[in-house]
Image (cartoon, grey):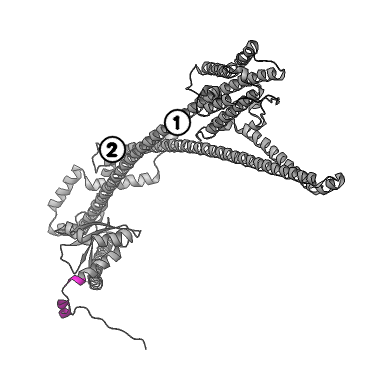
Amino acid sequence: MSDQEELDQDYGPSEATILFANEVRTEFRKAFPLRSETQKKLEMTQKRNACRIRKQLNFDESMSPIALQAEVQRASFAIESKDRKLEDAEREIAKLKEKLEEKDTQYQKVLDEKEKLEYAKLELTNLSKQTEARLNEVESRNQLENEYWRTIGRKYYIWFKMANEQLEEIHDILSTGGSFDERAVQRINQAPMNIFMQLKDINFCENNYAQSLAAGSLLEFSGVQFEPQTAPQLDFTLFDSRIEGARFGENSTTFQPPKPENADNTILSDTIFSSNSTMADNSTILTGGGRANMSSFDYERDEKIQRLLLENSVLKDRLNVSKGRAEQSLIFEEKNRTLEKEKQLLQSKLDKTFSEIEAMRMGTARKLFSIDEEISKSGSSELNSQNKALKMVDRINNLLSENTKMEKEIASATSKIMSLTKQLNECDRRNSRVEDAYSEQLGKSIELENKLTEMTNKNYLLEQEITQLRQNIQCSVQPTDAGNTTQIFHMPQNPLEAAHEEFQAAETRKRKLSEYSDDPEAKRKREELVEELEERLRKAEIEKNIIEDSYNLHKDLASKFRQVCVALTGLQIKLKDADEGICTVQSEYEGRDRQFVFKCFYGTTRIDMLDVNSDQSSETIRKWEPLMRKYIGERNSIPAFLAAVTLQLEQERDFDQTILERTHTFSVLHAD
């Protein structure tokens, strides 16, 4: 025996398969007998008499009415089962269609949401671009203004060094007792150009040069100190006229520094020319008309006026800088360290000033208490004591005035420090707000991008699911060659031959049990079969009667229960579709053509109102719309809505007619 034969023997048909094949063979023999057997059966029936035919009709299972009724019942049951399966399949197809529609709606919603997200992303992108453009614009403007102020600072610093060098030359000439001849005037006029040649190539950004220049205060600058010289009585008319001219704008180029112009390549050259012109005008004052009539005292007065005007212009420039816009955050950040150092220096100066004031007060007190001792020691006269007292009073007044002046300077410096600190804090807050807004917008953009990616993935999954459902529907709807009711079985044996063999065996057994057989066992079996069939028929009739009685009883109870419900609630409820849960509710106070349609979801407490059936549905809906909004929309209570409808309809009907009818009564029961 080969391996294939052993494998076939091991994997042969099972016992259940054999039994099923025998049953199919038997049913097939009964349904499709052979021609020879049919011919023999016809010949035998022709030879039999009426008695034999009657007995055969009574005892042949295939021709008996009980067997036919059973076959009909089985066929009807099979048809009903097939119909139920068909209905289930149709219901399943309808559910699949609904799911497909829901998926389509969800897909459409996802697409709409995707479009909204893309629009929001585009808006955020535009907003971020606008913010970046604004930041770049502010940064470029700040850089440009920073460059302007850097150029202005360089310009004023060079101008200051020129003027200072010229004053130094004048101081040297005056200190040596020289005269202002042509050589001295040439030295004075040449000094600004020498300073310019020295400073034209200097870089303020290297070796903390600008930081060292910014350190300190303007009050520390003492200027060029001139020593007073004795001079004869002079005529000050020329000097007064010059002062008046400078005060009222005449010869303004002598005392006013050049004003800042637009930022271009000619700033430095304009500074040089304006400085040279200023120095030339100053030299005209020194070497102009009436030069022989001017003395060192006149020069000193001129120098003091120029110094005051210079300080005034510097203070005005600093005031304009401090009144600049708060958006110059970058400039304030660069000056933050310098301002902190200035604050520390001012604080140290304040402490030093307070200590000096305290020392002055202590010294004044000592001098006041030592007046009597000095008077007693010197033994001077009363006139000397009065003079000393007057001098002491003058000294005290001077000290008080100096103290007041220093306190004012301290207060102004403190207020200036506070204002600068406030401006720095405001700039820091604005910068932090801008950074927070930018980071927030960036976070929102990232969040929207993540959400868009997530929705895209969901959309892709839904599309795959919809495609799979469509394929399933196409596969379930696609017809086959076998039709809708045919089933194909693959069996190891020919069922036709098995059916023939089974039919022949059944005919053989039937012949043995026929009337020709005198076997007592066969007669006994026939009698038992007849009794069993009669018992089954009797039980079937009893069950039929019980079912009919139960049906009538339930029908009667349902009718009574419906009447009681209508009498108690005033509402008639009818179940139109038990599978879908569709029911109608009609009030006994309204016409029969007006009713509400509801849908009940089994297993839950959910009830939906579907429609209002009426001849004039729009008027009916308009009539009950307030109650629908109140009880169904706001409170989500359909029983309350129906109760409100019943109350309103009961109030609208004729009350006199209701009293005459007397259909409803009530009584009160009291417990003993």
Q: Is residue 466 above or below residue 542?
A: above
| Mark 2 or 1, nearer chain start | 1
Kindly identify the residue that appears in the image at 22 percent across and 78 percent down.
664
Kindly identify the residue that appears in the image at 22 percent across and 69 percent down.
648
**Type of the residue with mark 1:** Arg
**Type of the residue with mark 2:** Gln
Per the image, the residue denoted by label 1 is 134
Graded by Cα atoms within 10 Å as few (under 14), some (14 to 19) or many (20 or more), the crowding at tag 2 reads few
Per the image, the residue denoted by label 2 is 474
Q: Which of 193 and 498 is in front in this view?
A: 193
Q: Nearer the viewer, residue 614 or 624?
A: 624
Magenta span dominant secondary structure: helix
Quadrant of the snapshot with the N terminus: top left
**Which span is picked out in magenta?**
650-661
Q: Is residue 79 above or below residue 55?
A: above
Where on the picture, by quarter, is residue 169? Answer: top right
Is residue 137 located in the magenta-colored stretch of the structure? no
Q: Which mark is residue 150?
A: none
Q: Is residue 105 visible to us here?
A: yes
